[in-house]
Each structure stands twice: as C-alpha cells, then as structure tokens.
Image: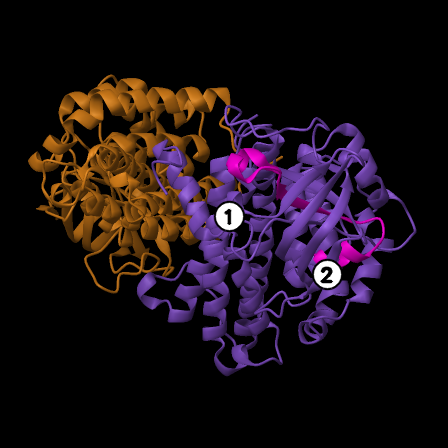
Amino acid sequence: MAIDFELSEGSKLAQSHYHAVAQEQMRPISRKYDLAEHQLPVEWVDYWWNEGRSGPKERSGKPNDGFITVCLQAEELCWGDAGLYLRMPTPALGGSAVSAAGTKEQQKRFMSAFREEGGHPIWGAMAITEPQAGSDAAAIETTADFDPETEEWILNGTKIFCTAGEGASTADGGFIVVWATIDKSAGRGGIKSFVVMANTPGMELIGCEKKLGIRASDTATLRFDDCRVPKENLLGSAEVRKKDPTQSGDKGFKGAMATFDASRPIVAAMATGVGRAALDFLKEELERQGITIRYDAPPRELTAIERDVIEMEADLQAARLLTWRAAWMMNKGKRNNLEASMAKAKAGLAVTKITQKTVQILGPVGYSKKLLVEKWMRDAKINDIFEGTQQINQLIVARRILDYPSAMLR
Amino acid sequence: MIDFEPSEEQALIIETVHQFAENEIRPVCREADESGTPPKSVVEAAHELGLVANALPEAQGGGGERSAMTGVLIAEELAWGDLAIALAILSPGLLGFPLSDFGSESQQSDLLPGLMDAGFVPGSLAIVEPRFDFDVYHPHTIAKQDGDEILLDGVKCQVPWLDGGRHLVVIATEAETAGLAAFIVPRNIAAMKAEPELMMGLGGLPTVELTLSGVRVPKSARLGADDADIRRLIDRGRVALAAAGIGTARASFELSLEYAKQRETFGQPIATRQAIAFMLADMAIELDGARLLVWEAAAALDRGEDATRLARLAYDQTTRISLQVTDGAVQVFGGHGYIRDYLPELHLRNVAGFASFEALTLI
C-alpha cells in the first residue's frame, strides 16, 4: 500500500466500455432530447434497461478500484450526455438512501426489481426539496402522520426538483424516497424517509420543469395529498420514533445526510464528464484549425488559447483527483465528509468555468446549436447547484477545517 | 490500483522531515530571510538526515533509493518549514541528480562522494536567464566546442550560491546541436563572475547572477545528456518545485486558519464570517487539488513515463493557487499580514517567484 495513480485493469475496462456507450448510445441522440425536453428518450431507456445495466462483458475477475470505478462510469456517461445519464432507469439516489438507511429486508424488497432481467424499465428517485426549502433541508414541511388503525403513514406536502420524479412516480415497481417530518417541533430529529412506490394513490405528478440544461432529465414536482404508505416503508427501523428533543440526529436525518457523502463524489464525477466533453471538443477543434497545445512552450510564447486550455486541464484534473480521493476513502470505509465536499465544490466550479470558457473561445461556433458545446455549458451549471450548492459545500469545508459546529458558522 | 495513502515508509519520512521543519527550520526562517543566508547549523543538521544522499547511487556511497514521490513528500515538508531554507538543504541534489542521471563513471566518482561527506556541501545549477522572454528550452547561454575545450558564454540568474559549494551545473544551448546541454563547472573559475542578487523573496537562499565570459571547461565537463534528457530534468525540477510551493502555501494556510479563529471583530472570531471562512475553504480545496496533481506527476516520473504535460499542469496550478493562498493569508491577517513580524508576507514574497523559477531544486 503506497501512493499510486494507476487505474486497475477493471477500471480501465469500465472506462473504455462506458466511453463507447456514451459515444454510440448517447451522443447521437443528445441534441434530439435537449430539444424535445419532456419526451421520454426511449432509445436510451430501453438500451440501458435491456443491455446497458449489465456493464462490460469481460468484467468478472478483474480487480477494480471500487467507488472510483463507479466515478469513472459516471464521468464517461456524462461525457456522453448528463441529462440522459439522469434519465437512466436505475435506483439512483433513491437506491442510495435505501442502501444507506434501509434494513436488509427493505433493501431486498425495494431493490430486487432493479436487478431482475426483462420487464419494463423502472426508476428510483429521492424527493427532498420543497418550494421554500432546498439547502436548508431541515426546514422541509411535508408531514407524515401515523394512522394506528391501518398502520400507515399519511404524507402531505409538495416536493419540487425531484430528479427522475416522472419515471419513479409512474413506472410500476419503481419508488421515490420522500423526506417528511413526523414532528415539525423536533426539527431535524423529526425528519424521516419514506419509500413511496410508483402509482401510490395520493402521490400526484404535477409536471416537470423547463430548465437551462440537462433537459432530458425529468425534474418533477410531486404533490402528496393524504398519500398512504405502509409502516414497513419507513426507512430504517419500523419502530415509531416520536419527538424526542434529547435524541439529537438519530439515524433518520443523519443517515440520510450521510447518503450525500456517498453521492457527492459521483456528482463531482458527473460534472467532470461534462467539463471533459467541452475540453476534448475544444482541443479537437483547435487541432483541426492547426493549433496544438504546447505544454513545453515558455509562458511568454503561449497564445492566450494555449494558456487557457492548460489552465482548464489543470483545474479539471484537480477536480477529478479530488473526486477519486473522496471515492477512495469510501473504499477504505473512512468518513469522507470533508473530502466529498471539497470534490463537489471544486468540480462544480471548475466545469462551470471550463464550459463557459470553451463557449467563449469557440466564438459564434460555440454559441450555435449546430454543436453540443453550448449545451454542455448549460448542462454543466447544475453541478454547481444540486446535491449541495457550491456555497453549502464551501460552508461544510469551512466548518470542518475550522472545527466549528454549525452554530458557530452559518 | 489507485491509492492516496502514503506507505508506512513514506509516512515515516513525512513525519521525520516535518518534525525537523517544525523544530529546526521554522524558528529561524525570518532570521534567514533578513540576513540573506540560512543558519549553518540548520543545513548541517539537515545534512545528517541524509535526505539527498539517500537518493544518490549506492555505488558512490548513497542510499540508492531514488523516487520522485519520496522527493515531493520531502520537498513539501521542508518548504512548509521555509522555502528558502528548504532549497538550501536540497541544493546538493542540483549537482547530485544530474550526475546520477547523466554523469560518466569518472564524473560520478569524482564528484558524488563529496556530496555525501560528513559536512554539508551545497550544490548549484544555473538555468534561468535575466530576460523577459526567457525560454528555458532555448537559453541564450551558448556552449561552443573549441578544440579539446568548451567555451561557455552567457548570463544566468537565480543561481543558488551557498558558502562552501565547489561545483555547479550550467545549462546551455550547444552551438553544434542547437539543443540543450549540461556542463559541470567549478565555482571558482576566473572567467565567471558571481554577483549577489536580491529578489523579492527567497531571502534565505543566497543566489547570484552569473556572467560567463569565455569560460573554458574540458570536453569531459559535459554531462552525457542530450536535449531530450535536459527537458526531462526540467520536468523533474518543475514537479519538485511545485511540491515546495504546496508546502509554502500550506504553511500560509495553516497560519491564517489559526489566526482567523482567535482574531475577533465585532465580538466574534473572524473565522465565523463567511467572507473569511469561504476564503479559507477555497484555500484548502485548491491546496489539496494541486497537491494531487503534483503526486500524479511524481508517480508518472517514477513509472518512467513522459511527464512533461503532467509536470506542466502541476507546476502551473501550484503557481496559481499558491499565490491565491498566500495572498489570502496576508488578507486574513489584515494589517498584521503586512508587517514582517508575521510570516504571511514572507510566504507571499516567496511564491511570487514561481512564475519564473526553474530547477531551483530537483528530485
């Protein structure tokens, strides 16, 4: 065990496999579904469900790099198309929540359908954000009240910005993990996660957002109107936890927040994929114009473009390595709250700058919808916002390096 | 398999060097910067650690353990103590590594053992030139064959010049090939004038502007390195310097973190204000990101791969972020960041030179 930057064989295999998937399955329909914003990308969804999700064929037996390999998959597929990536029929964040906070029985019950061959595509999703609460997740107002006669939880409230919310709420067998409070006065101690199966009465898909980018992703608004879920769908123990101010942050809220430590590196990897798409294209276009990037030219001789490209490459690579570090810590079972936030903050910032700069450098060509460059700039921006805004991640990093509780630094 | 954890051996090296930096280097860094030279006792004590000797060839008395990764770990910790003193301590490598990589058997046996003697013998390397348009790959210092000798003409700057040094490496453009070449030159040669120079920073490392006017060296003074070899040496220099830059910036960052937690304004530590806290967070993120680039470049060097691009990315990023970090530290310290009673202004002055440094240290 020592510092090592060589990807294992399994990782390299995954990298080239998913790159091919991105190139062959995603890029050809990238513009189509960016324009047809609310249309289901059937070619991609069917491909993924029937073929894509089994992964590279020659995988077994080859060592890989654990969560780093997962990051490589995310990076390659988002190099393909970030919106389509988020439209994949997969457990996604809903699955992460179930894996992080669910009992063994719940994991089996909710996740098996995703592993079965055949059938129709299904989605998992997570619904947290509400019109008045995003970064401040503890301020959500969707309520869950227990009905002791039927032993069901009754959900009431509205969720917005739920990624894959349309698929997850309407395709039988899929589910949405919904955050709701069983006691508003208990603050975060009262927040629980509930698995709501697709087509549960009382859960209504209001519609999907029209967005700046990742237009192929179904970003849904869901209304819960006396939506009843069985008590076995409360993630974690089935034991009813009433308000208890002495019990700070029980597994409910904390367990859910820990999900983000696991998903942040993946989101950072997604961002890296979009940034790389822009950078790869820029370098190819420059080559076509007879411009190569000289890594060994003296600074005073570098053209402005070369200087920009070298800076973008360095930033992107820094983001990628920070992401791998956060993922590697997960491999080692180490707490990676600080590192995951560093990766997410850097990646979001870096790819925003990279994609915006690429559009600028390419001039009118970068601005035209004839190319995907302008789309990548629009797609990149969300990475600075969802799953923890850049500012929230800066706040987390600051608190950790200063060793300050949240009360000391808001 | 990707791994970000130093081995046990690497961790021990980091710990040892860090202790040395904390106990021996840090307390004297201001004095060194003001006086223009590192205290002799510190470089002698560091020499005892054998940090450079350990990487030199076994056949000549060294440890034979050459590793770019180990080198960057060492460089970061020493520079965390102080950049100028770190470069002084590592200066034997400026002679030692080119000799190891490109020296003939007789060149090696003549000069390497001297670097590993009981007392500290500094090394030196002349590469940068005092020109706005300086191109490290096409220096204006020319080496021309003249019978059995080689004539060297040109002007170099930023040449480390510690007391007691006997030889230096001069990087020149070889007239016959128009490519880079390296020569071993005795320091006391008459046709070479060494003029002490003062720079914005690196006060604790004596450097000179070197004027070579028809300096004559025997053909045997040429190192067996061609243009491609010297380019690789330049890459190694960049990776090593970048590691030192990270160390300096890290020192700056840690001081500002500590300061921000105890300095109060309007009744609370300034670290509780987002403007300050976010600056510190950004410093931490950029530092960690740049360090990983340095490690990646070092790993590539150790695998024997062409690391020009990675070295460039690592060096450029470090140049950018170390300025961001040290400038940020001065800012966090406010008025106290501006006076020489505190270290942030020293760190800022030191890293400002990165835009022009080349091969001030090697791994």
**Residue numbers of the magenta segment:** A164-191
Image spot of residue B291 (x, y percent): 42, 41
- What is the chain letter for disc 2? A
Q: Is residue B220 above or below residue B50?
A: below
Q: Crowdedness of circle 2 by 10 Å Cα count: few (<14), some, many (20+)?
A: some
- Quadrant location of residue A234? top right
* Magenta segment includes A167: yes
**Figure chain in purple:** A
Quadrant (top left/top right/bottom left/bottom right) for the N terminus of chain A:
top right
List the residue tagged with mark 2.
A205
Image spot of residue A133 (x, y percent): 52, 52
Residue at 60%, 53% (x, y): give it: A270
Q: Secondary structure at mark 1?
A: helix
- Residue A395 left/right relative to B120: right
Q: Which of A246 and A198 lies nearest the eye of the viewer?
A: A246
- Residue type highlighted by circle 2: Leu
> Comparing marks 2 and 1, which lies closer to the viewer?
2
- Residue type highlighted by circle 1: Lys
- Residue A239 left/right relative to B91: right
Distance in Å between CA atoms under marks 2 and 1: 30 Å
Q: Can residue B103 be seen?
A: no
* Magenta segment includes B131: no
> What shade has chain B been given?
orange
Quadrant (top left/top right/bottom left/bottom right) for the C terminus of chain A:
top left
Q: According to the image, what is the colour scheme of the structure? A: by chain
Same-chain status of marks 2 and 1 = yes
List the residue tagged with mark 1.
A344
- Residue A270 left/right relative to B254: right
Image spot of residue B90 (x, y percent): 28, 32
Q: Can residue A167 be seen?
A: yes
Q: Are the residues tagged 2 and 1 within 8 Å (C-beta)?
A: no
